[in-house]
Image: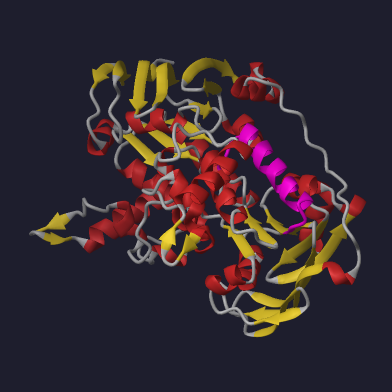
Amino acid sequence: MKDILEMKNIQKSFPGVRALKGVDFKVKVGEIHSLMGENGAGKSTLIKILTGVYQKDEGTIFFDGKEVTIKNTIDAQNMGISTVYQELNMIPYLTVAENIFLGRYPRKNNVIDWKKMNQNAQDLLDEMKLNIRADIELNRYGTAAQQMVSIVRAISLNCKLIVLDEPTSSLDTDEVRMLFRVIRDLQKKNIAIIFISHRLDEVYEISDRITILKDGAYEGTYLVSELGQAELITKMVGREVEKKERIERLHSNSSDDYVIELKDILSKPKLRNISLHVKKGEIVGLAGLLGAGRTETAQVIFGYRMADSGTIKMHSVDLSLKSPRDGVKHKMAFCTENRREEGIIPNMSVRDNILLSSLRNISSHGFLNQKKGDEIVKQYLERFRIKTPSPYQKIKNLSGGNQQKVILARWLATQPDFIIFDEPTRGIDVGAKRDVENLIAEVADMGLAVLFISSEMSEIARNCDRVYVLKDGQVVGELSNQEIKQEIITNAIAEGE
């Protein structure tokens, strides 16, 4: 089939960084084409040039057989290029129909034609076999349904190419199946898909071809059938990545070593009678499907969310946490799953993001000790191998993996006793994932108590000393030692009551 998109010799530089070094990228009509590479490889920059967010420095773009200049996102949409981002760009308190036709509502006699808009939206939803009502507020549907609405909005723009950026990062297994069905239906309509994901099994299941970028340069394009996963990883990271087996960690079983202990925690409407503990130097996992109560449990511990009843103890002392500030005062740390909205301050520098939670420790009489701050920043930049041209680079210009390392550096600089990692590897590549997992193990080896939350059972099995299995807001199982295997965790979730 002919190419719907051809990008030739695309180059782009930012202050201190050459993001793209003559990249070539082709997508065929009706093809599902995965764009792969480590964080910082240039994927996001290339897509932002395609969709009009950035302007290329050099190179040419051909779309639907014609050379085009894409000056802004409206240009891209008018040409038939749409993007569904990892962080959904929707308005929750508008109806589904209003979100689909946002900014282009049908009118009759200069008044919005609500009946026509709802009917047109419902027709599109029905055509995609989605059990979604057009006249219902969007916030009454879950993440997966909202993602489908984003795709329907793209289709309503008569798009010829859809970019799906990490579309499965917040979906469970059944929701991923639904998404893949929709993607294949789009393919049958000759709509091309650019699929960006760090979940290799999904890439191999859904894709026709894979293009790999490395350090801002084009590495190659391959048929999925011709490229094994191990070879793909090697091409992405430039080295073979060892499969990390589960490490049997050394920690005391004495009850005196409990750092955090929860007893019969009730927090309406989600949590019911949660009891767990984490010891010094131990990595404890929370496993369960989306909505099981994992993040809510972490939020109660840290003071984000109030418990209606039950007790929280730290070092055997009862706590009454009313805010995250209370959690920090008790030497807790929380690496949130929502990196963009709750983790980083995007327009602040890498340096300021690292020091954000340690200002009190490096201040005297209201003045910051700049030299002490510089020492802390230098220590963590080197220790965590954070890739940035300067400590004064805005953190929003770093890759997801490096942003995650900055968040970890920020919290470790506070010298906590207990740290929560909520989906620490979400949206980062294989190489950066290994780095983050190794850093978490290093944190536990330093004697910190670690609570580790992940939707990927393989991560839980690889990294945790003990695992609590959650279902419907309750602890339904506890696993340790040789019990911590992916299939056992999965069965415990399925069978838990």
Q: Is residue 132 above or below residue 371?
A: below
**Quarter holding residue 391:** top left
Query: What residue do we see at 41% from left, 22% from top?
Result: 20
Range shown magenta: 427-449
Query: What residue do we see at 78% from left, 44% from top?
Result: 462
Quarter of the image for the N terminus: give it. Answer: top left
**Quarter holding residue 479:** bottom right
Q: How is the image coloured?
A: secondary structure
Looking at the picture, tell me which residue is in the foreground, 72 or 371.
371
Query: What residue do we see at 31% from left, 19% from top?
Result: 61
Quarter of the image for the C terminus: give it. Answer: bottom right
Give the main secondary structure, helix, strand or loop, of the magenta stretch: helix
Magenta run includes residue 16: no
Looking at the picture, tell me which residue is in the foreground, 175 or 381.
381
Q: Is residue 185 left or right of residue 174?
A: left
Looking at the picture, tell me which residue is in the foreground, 406 or 23.
406
